[in-house]
Amino acid sequence: MTDTHPTGWFGDFGGRFVPETLIAALDELADAWISAMADAAFRDELDHMLRHWVGRPVPITHCPRLTAHCGGADIWLKREDLAHTGAHKINNTLGQVLLARRMGKTRIIAETGAGQHGVATATACARYGMTCEVYMGAEDARRQALNVFRMRLLGATVHEVHDGSCTLKDATNAALRDWMGSVGKTHYVLGSVVGPHPFPDMVRDLQSIIGHEARGQCLDRIGSLPHTVVACVGGGSNAAGIFAGFVGDADVRLIGVEAGGRSDDTGEHAASIGLGAPGVLHGSRSLVLQNDDGQTATVHSCSAGLDYPGVGPQHAHWHASGRANYIRVDDTSALDAFQLLARLEGIIPALESSHAVAAACTIAADMSSDQVLLVNCSGRGDKDVEEARRLLD
């Protein structure tokens, strides 16, 4: 869809930068995905499960009190927090587990940061009786202890990774090492629009249901397309998913929100687009946070799901082409928005989504009252309550 080259390039970004042992597996995966998308029976099963198991379509919700508080544009939320497991991640994991079953794979592995992708992968594997192993940085496991328990409750084995910064980058490294040694029986359910081709295309396509639903819902309920669409960006799957519904509409402004962390100093944020440079990370060329020696930098965010030193290559391309704009929100503003949406609208957002809510308040104030701003509420905040309480205390 849109500007993808058959070999997975988006302008100057994308491609495959992986060991030779993974080339055949990636070719097999790309062929299987094309075949599955051409198979009406596969699409029908996926659509059936999305509707009757995931609970789609999820609604758009008007936020009158938040709108009055912020001033300016009329604010609406796309409610991915209402999907089964509490976030957009299930859209991707369900599709990939169905694909793995079609390919004859018997073992599923995944990486996770905030734990929602791990929970969603474990959930899909439980539904289809497949073995599931999840890699998670030890620091993220501490921050997201509830999701670690949920994964284990669902039957998954959780491997805590103690390398590097003990966060999402290190979990992804561990999952890729596993996959290199087990490609014959294993499918790697990569959780975002990152990695080597075909993962960025495949994950975006599975998440594009967010944007296509939202587009129709806006026309139906509001009577027009939104003027602005806002979504948080770590690896970028929820943003790519909602942007996909509007990227062809030149009058719709697309804004991605990165984790500004504590400051712009190296190691104190996770703003790969705003403060990164072209580089290769986890198998694709994109914008990557790097230190003075060109090594992947450590990163920080109060949100485990945005705590990643790179971004999906299509986001890097949208930034370079000017189709989307990317800004950053710091930890303090995200925590303020976490509380604000709860108090004004009775919705507790994930800390990831709180970055988008914080940005939306600032952006809406500079818009007119007859304009609509749509925020992708990518997940609910149950998983973050303990960590938020610790940080606020």
Image (cartoon, rainbow, N blue to C red):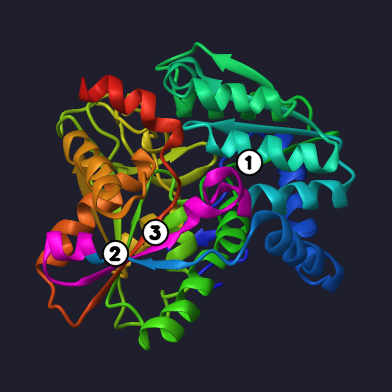
Q: Quadrant of the N terminus?
A: bottom right
**Mark 1 and mark 2: span between their CA atoms?**
27 Å
Task: Give the mark toward the camera: 1 or 2.
Answer: 2
Residue at point 42% right, 80% down? Answer: 248
Query: What residue type is disc 1 on?
Result: Ala
Q: Secondary structure at mark 3?
A: strand
Secondary structure, mark 1, is helix
Measured Cα–Cα span from mark 3 to mark 2 = 13 Å
Dot 1 and dot 2 residues touching (CB under 8 Å): no
The residue that label 2 is drawn on is 63
Circle 3 or circle 2, nearest the eye: 2
Q: Percent from the top left, x then y, of residue 144?
A: 47, 24
Q: Residue at horizontal 52%, vertical 47%?
A: 87
Q: Which residue is mark 1?
A: 120
Q: Nearer the viewer, residue 233 or 387?
A: 387
Would residue 152 appear left or right of 144 to someone viewing this image? right
Q: As shown in the figure, which amino acid type bears the numbered disc 3?
A: Asn
Q: Which residues are magenta?
A: 65-91
| Callout 1 touching callout 3 (CB < 8 Å) | no
Q: Which residue is mark 3?
A: 376
- State the image coordinates of residue 28 (x, y, percent, origin top left): 79, 50
Q: How many marks?
A: 3
Position of 103 with respect to 142 (left or right) is: right
Residue in the foreground of this view, choosing between 81 and 178: 81
Q: Position of residue 376 (x, y in %)?
A: 39, 59
Which amino acid type corresponds to the residue marked 2 in the rendered image? Answer: Cys
Evaluate whether residue 14 shows in this view: no
Please tell me how crowded label 3 is: few (under 14), some (14-19), or many (20+) other residues with Cα within 10 Å: many
